[in-house]
Image: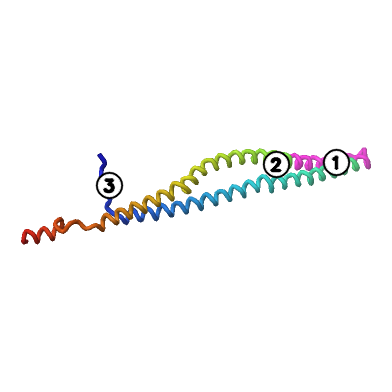
Amino acid sequence: MRQAARVTSINALKDFKRALGSFGIVVNTALGEAQADLQRTTWWIQQDQLTRWKNEKRARTTRLEQAKSELFRAQVAAPDLRVPSTMQRKAVDKAQRLLDEAETKIANVKRWSRLLEREVVLYKGHCQKLGRVVEGDLPRALIKLDRMVAALEKYVSIRGPASDSPTAASRETGS
């Protein structure tokens, strides 16, 4: 046996419908902003950072070659002096460390790029479910709420027979 619904306020249903509609707008906005953030972040890592560190590697390779060349010239110019070549040797070591850093950064950017791609795929999978609910189920729920409110308002507007009202009953009894 079906139980009757106890609706105490049609306005509460209307308020809920408005809140549900607002929720849908907020969710769509949030999903759009999150997608834009993902695209910016992906672009920054895969394009900007990778390009930056590849350019930096080229520049640092050039500096290392220059430092090695200066060390060689210093050794050739004064083979018996250790002081001039010590400074050049330190410059070569520093240039090598900087080049190693650039190579490490490139490897890190590539690694993070792969990890980011995997996480983006997982994120999109979860968000697509929410997006489908907001795009499909939410509009159907809003239409259903509209129908419910209309049916309840129609029901409330129906007047019962005159004999059923308390004033008509009191007139019949003479009170």
Measured from the top left, where is residue 105 in percent x and y?
Answer: 70, 41
Q: Quadrant of residue 12?
A: bottom left
Residue 79 horizontal side relative to residue 101, left or right: right
Q: Is residue 84 visible?
A: no
Mark 3 lies on a secondary structure that is loop
Q: Label for residue 105? A: 2
Q: Please report contact status of discs 1 and 2: CB closer than 8 Å, yes or no.
A: no
Q: Is residue 8 above or below residue 122?
A: below
* Quadrant of the snapshot with the C terminus: bottom left
Q: Which residues are magenta?
A: 75-101
- Determine the secondary structure under disc 2: helix
Distance in Å between CA atoms under marks 1 and 2: 23 Å
Q: Residues within 10 Å of mark 3 (few under 14, many from 20)?
A: few
Answer with left or right where residue 104 lies relative to residue 9.
Answer: right
Of pointers 1 and 2, the one earlier in the residue sequence: 1
At 51% from the left edge and 53% from the top edge, which residue is drawn?
29
Q: Which mark is residue 76?
A: none
